[in-house]
Image: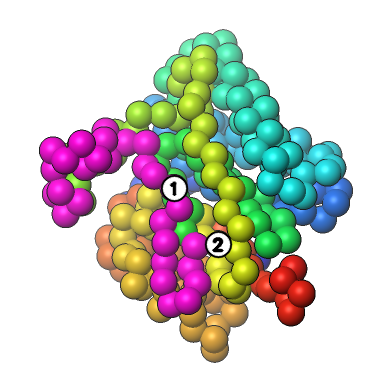
Amino acid sequence: MVFLTDKGRVRSHNEDNGGIFVNKDGTILAVVCDGMGGHQAGDVASQKAVDHIRELWEESINVSSPEPAEIWFKTYIGQINQFLFDYANQHEECHGMGTTIVAAIIGESFFTIAHVGDSRVYLVSNDHAKQLTEDQTFVNELVKSGQISKEDAEHHPRKNVILQALGTEKTVKIDLKTITYDDPGYLLLCSDGLSNKVNDDKLVEVLKNEHHSLESKAQKLILLANQNGGEDNITVAIVELSVTEEGSG
């Protein structure tokens, strides 16, 4: 597993954050947050969200099956949202701050995803990249309702308008999904600084390259996003999904 973040080629500082953490039972949690807000507030929102979820996760036990994983996300992401909302209201310089979050709890032969905003999770297996999250964005709503095509969405002037974020409202809608897997592959979590710049075919090409380490693959993805403009911060977390003969791993 590997986590990497880069400020890109244009931004003066990095408002993305995240990491890969292990709890007391050895269960993995991967997180990517993309902060937003004036001045330094985006950094504050993403940093505080990640610090909180890491602390809560490292103290947790018995979250190694789907139902407890979904309950854990519902409970604690809701708490983090409330904390960020209160913090923003108490600190004038942080008014309006918020952050996307995408997180995955990875157990044996299953993973549970929680998602708010437009950071994404992809499952890359069998030479195919499947986007598992649905962007909570204005433009994605236009696509879903048939008003514009997916191609139009790529260049829409309001492409970066997200409808949900942690910390901007008192309550937040968390998308949850549990998927079981029995094929080896990779779970890729990323901010839109990567997904806007690197297409699905490239994701597969980089991740399926057997001659490179996971660290090299993450570096390559960030390099590609930068070569394609790098206008935004770029963050990736990659977890290898291994399957043993007995179907666990």
Which one is in front, 59 or 67?
67
**SS for tag 1?**
loop
Which quadrant of the figure has residue 187? bottom right
Three-letter amino acid code of the residue under disc 2: Leu
**SS for tag 2?**
strand
Q: Residue 101, image x and y in percent?
A: 52, 39
Residue with the most extreme front position: 246
Which quadrant of the figure has residue 215? bottom right
Three-letter amino acid code of the residue under disc 1: Thr
Residue bearing the label numbered 2: 187
Neighbor class of circle 1 (other Cα within 10 Å; few <14, some 14-19, many 20+) is many
Which one is in front, 121 or 87?
121
- Magenta range: 123-152
At a point 68% along the width and 62% down the height, the residue shown is: 109
At a point 54% along the width and 44% down the height, the residue shown is: 177
At a point 35% along the width and 29% down the height, the residue shown is: 163
Q: Residue 75, image x and y in percent?
A: 67, 27
Q: Is residue 218 visible?
A: yes
